[in-house]
């Protein structure tokens, strides 16, 4: 027998698949479709990571299984290629980002091909290709025309030394990633998308899809819908009101102070009335240095300043309460002001304790002077006027009615999710297709002029004022207004990295269409994505942004299905052998191509699916990789034991049906590790029995094919099973035959259990007796005695009475 040479076998089959276009998704097909999507990679300079292999092999397995089941499968791949690492690398080396991107894509392509993935390479998309980003710009324009894109003042992270606007991930802890200098917040007019308008639709849409529960929860928390009320507190000695948002209007009688955020406009508006303005200004400076996370999550030790000269009147009790400024209240949520109820809110309680502010209990049951009492679901109201004696839920409703009737406030729903800051002041992104005209204002670039492409520049460094490098190129910036024809200027901000990935799954359906994102026929046939798998780190922003774009396209009639992803799952991270995140500095990075070169792609694929529970993190182990290689060696050797018997042998029938069932079901449930363990155990059984029939081998390698496609296709060919394995059918099982027919039968000698024998469940008495006599431990109780009676209940017990 030929020996198993993974590299030669794998190269051979990869060439055949490519030449025969084996995995090309058909555009016009009567077959049922299956669309499997994995998150397309960012083609960085460091190449493919074993994390990519774990992420992609799961749906690779499902895709190959679906093809064997007769589906027309779309399993595409592409490049999410705009973004900072490429631009920064270009800045350092002087190489154009286009060239950097193309080089990286070449490396990624060859790495993914070496892994043997069954992608349809003819549908590859690249977000930096003008034929692609023409449509990214087109979608932006539709949003602009529907009032969903607007410009507003905001702050960007700016390094004074590098003169560059930094992304959040480049300016962690308030310092510049490159030079370590302090990062300042620069006020700029930037683009936003009104994703908040879609908050309810994005929440409701979750009912229509099948996402892993923890993914659904992440989406819900990110959107963060809260029901409550806005309430107006009269500001003493002004004609103004201080408006707050509260989820707990039932606690209004327990308000003992108010808090406004350091950015609240009243601090400027009433500056002349504030007696301790200097102190407050200093506090504003200090809180500006903190991140939102530090303000909200880490602020165990509450800080704040009482505003002398401003106080508020409780609209239900008539009490006067002080107004404080404190940075645990965020300007970006609700109204940027709160009514503080220290008895029943932990943050307010900590604040009140620190600054000696009274605490008034309004819900019975706690010891509010010692601890905030927050677990109040069923509590009863006290000290609360007309809502005394009511339960919390009823009190909330009654209070909101009262507020509305008396025009003191109104019911209000709030969302944690902010509008999407849709801008970057950098070069390597999609230009925002807007023209600024002094006369006509913001004018969309006419659709027939799309795409607005990037000019070739020598310098990718943003301008000193924090504008994108595009602002330095007059030939590009200066244009005529499409409406009035006067001199006008192009928008120089580019889109954020999330833009291109917000609709890429649609383009795969019809990647070369010049007139539309995709044709109606393709949308109708391929939509929605049947199964989307990716990282947990993308289940908030990317998953929400892309659902938003998709839902918008649905609302304006561009796509015919409401939700893009029918199902979403996620893989766990792969950690280094030391249990730490793989990183260059730790030196624990495993390069997938090293594994392929040493053991073969089939081993790499098998190992990344065998490494552990797919949804949990997994620690890399070199010895386990070798174990997977040995498994494949033993699969290869099964060919030595082949018999000519037709069908499944009697001895292996239940083994075959059980294995087929377990592997089929486990693949679907993403329990790849136990599916592979089952196949390993089957190989042991074949080995122990020293035989396997042709039909058994045929079914077995079909089951293994999605995980290890090269070795199985090769065995199929060597054994002349006919045609190619990838065109064969998926094996089926018969539920009845999965039941064990060999059982462990207890044997009693004169009423005492002395052992167990392995017999078929309907063995006759002679066979049972023979097995009992052959068992040394049982036979010793019979030896030298006379058998007087045999009571045999097939499948249950065998009792032998001796004298
Ligand atoms: C009074 C109160 C009493 C509150 C009580 C809570 C418990 P979620 O569920 O997150 O929406 N709040 C409102 N705006 C805020 C802001 N900009 N920054 C910080 N906190 C803010 O929380 C809503 C609650 O968080 C609101 O209800 C308000 O405090 C606070 F026993 O009002 B509550
Ligand atoms: Zn104009």
Image (cartoon, grey):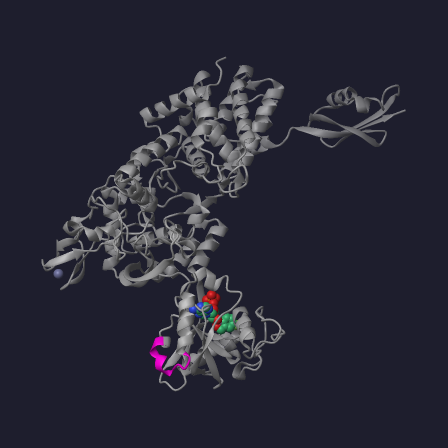
Say if the magenta span includes residue 145.
no
Residue 27 visible in the current orientation: no
**Total count of labels:** 0
Q: Is residue 121 above or below residue 253?
A: above
Q: Residue at the left extreme? A: 485
Q: Is residue 369 left or right of residue 545?
A: right
The quadrant of the rendering that contains the C terminus is top right
Up-down: is 352 above or below 595?
below
Quadrant location of residue 278?
Answer: bottom left
Pinpoint residue 510: horizontal percent, then vertical percent: 27, 40
Picture coordinates of residue 109 (x, y %)? Answer: 34, 33
Q: Describe residue 472's horizontal placement relative to residue 65 as left or right.
A: left
Q: Is residue 463 visible?
A: yes
Residue at 26% x, 37% y: name it: 99
Does residue 269 belong to the magenta stretch? Answer: yes
The front one of 540 and 353 is 353
- Furthest-right residue in view? 803
Above or below, 395 relative to 775: below
24 with respect to 643 (left or right) = left
Q: Position of residue 306 (x, y in %)?
A: 46, 77
| Nearer to me, 204 or 245 | 245
Coordinates of residue 539 in the picture (x, y in percent)? 43, 50
The quadrant where residue 222 appears = bottom left
Magenta span covers which residues? Answer: 268-276
* In the image, farthest residue toward the top: 1
Q: Quadrant of residue 220?
A: bottom left
- Relative to the observer, which residue lies in front, 261 or 19? 261
Left or right relative to 696: residue 128: left
Front residue of this view, candidates 799 and 140: 140
């Amino acid at each position: 027998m030929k020996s198993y040479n993974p590299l030669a076998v794998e190269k051979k089959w990869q060439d055949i698949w490519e030449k025969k276009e084996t995995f090309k998704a058909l555009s016009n097909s009567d077959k049922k479709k299956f669309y499997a999507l994995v998150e397309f990679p960012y083609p960085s300079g460091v190449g493919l990571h074993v994390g990519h292999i774990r992420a992609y092999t799961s749906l690779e397995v499902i895709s190959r299984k679906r093809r064997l089941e007769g589906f027309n499968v779309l399993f595409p791949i592409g490049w999410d290629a705009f973004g900072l690492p490429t631009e920064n690398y270009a800045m350092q080396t002087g190489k154009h980002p286009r060239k950097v991107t193309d080089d990286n894509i070449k490396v990624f392509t060859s790495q993914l091909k070496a892994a043997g993935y069954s992608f349809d390479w003819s549908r590859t998309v690249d977000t930096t290709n003008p034929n692609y980003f023409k449509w990214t710009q087109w979608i932006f324009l539709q949003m602009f025309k529907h009032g969903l894109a607007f410009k507003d003042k905001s702050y960007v992270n700016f390094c004074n030394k590098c003169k560059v606007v930094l992304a959040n991930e480049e300016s962690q802890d308030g310092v510049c990633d490159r030079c370590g200098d302090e990062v300042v917040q620069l006020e700029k007019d930037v683009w936003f998308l009104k994703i908040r308008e879609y908050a309810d639709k994005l929440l409701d849409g979750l009912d229509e899809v099948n996402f892993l529960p923890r993914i659904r929860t992440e989406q819900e928390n990110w959107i963060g819908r809260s029901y409550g009320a806005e309430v107006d507190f009269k500001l003493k000695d002004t004609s103004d009101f201080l408006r707050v948002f509260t989820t707990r209007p039932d606690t209004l009688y327990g308000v003992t102070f108010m808090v406004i955020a350091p950015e609240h406009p009243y601090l400027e508006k009433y500056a002349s009335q504030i007696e301790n303005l200097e102190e407050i200004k200093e506090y504003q400076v200090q809180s500006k240095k903190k991140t939102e996370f530090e303000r909200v999550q880490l602020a165990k030790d509450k800080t704040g300043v009482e505003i002398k000269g401003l106080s508020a009147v409780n609209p239900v009790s008539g009490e006067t309460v002080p107004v404080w400024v404190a940075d645990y209240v965020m300007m970006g949520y609700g109204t940027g002001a709160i009514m503080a109820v220290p008895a029943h809110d932990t943050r307010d309680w900590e604040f009140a304790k620190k600054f000696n502010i009274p605490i008034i209990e309004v819900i019975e049951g706690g010891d509010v002077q010692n601890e905030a009492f927050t677990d109040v679901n069923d509590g009863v109201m006290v000290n609360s006027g007309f809502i005394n004696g009511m339960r919390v839920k009823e009190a909330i409703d009654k209070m909101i009615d009262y507020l509305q009737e008396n025009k003191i406030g109104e019911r209000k729903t709030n969302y944690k999710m902010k509008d999407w800051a849709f801008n970057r002041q950098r070069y390597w992104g999609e230009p925002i297709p807007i023209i600024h005209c002094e006369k006509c204002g913001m004018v969309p670039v006419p659709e027939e002029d799309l795409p607005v492409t990037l000019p070739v520049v020598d310098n990718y460094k943003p301008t000193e004022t924090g504008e994108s490098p595009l602002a330095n190129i007059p030939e590009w910036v200066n244009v005529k207004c499409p409406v009035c024809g006067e001199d006008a200027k192009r928008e120089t901000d580019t889109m954020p990295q999330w833009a291109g990935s917000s609709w890429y799954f649609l383009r795969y359906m019809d990647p070369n269409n010049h007139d539309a994102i995709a044709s109606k026929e393709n949308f109708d046939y391929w939509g929605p994505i049947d199964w989307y798998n990716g990282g947990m780190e993308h289940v908030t922003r990317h998953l929400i942004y892309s659902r938003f774009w998709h839902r918008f396209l649905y609302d304006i009639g561009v796509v015919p299905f409401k939700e893009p992803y029918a199902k979403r799952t996620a893989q766990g991270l792969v950690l280094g052998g030391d249990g730490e995140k793989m990183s260059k500095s730790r030196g624990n990075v495993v390069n997938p191509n090293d594994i392929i070169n040493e053991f073969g792609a089939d081993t790499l694929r098998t190992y990344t699916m065998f490494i552990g529970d797919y949804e949990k993190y997994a620690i890399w182990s070199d010895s386990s990789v070798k174990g997977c290689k040995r498994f494949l060696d033993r699969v290869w050797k099964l060919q030595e034991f082949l018999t000519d018997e037709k069908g499944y042998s009697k001895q292996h029938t239940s083994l075959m049906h059980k294995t087929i069932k377990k592997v089929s079901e486990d693949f679907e449930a993403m329990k790849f590790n136990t599916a592979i363990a089952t196949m390993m155990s089957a190989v042991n059984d074949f080995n122990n029995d020293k035989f396997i029939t042709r039909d058994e081998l045929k079914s077995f390698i079909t089951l293994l094919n999605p995980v290890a496609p090269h070795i199985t296709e090769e065995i199929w060919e060597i054994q002349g099973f006919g045609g190619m394995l990838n065109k064969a059918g998926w094996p089926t099982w018969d539920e009845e035959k999965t039941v064990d027919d060999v059982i462990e039968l207890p044997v009693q000698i004169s009423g005492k259990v002395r052992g167990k024998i392995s017999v078929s469940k309907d063995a006759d008495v002679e066979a049972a007796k023979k097995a009992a006599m052959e068992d040394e431990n049982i036979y010793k109780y019979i030896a030298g005695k006379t058998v007087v009676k045999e009571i045999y209940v097939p499948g249950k017990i065998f009792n032998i009475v001796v004298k």
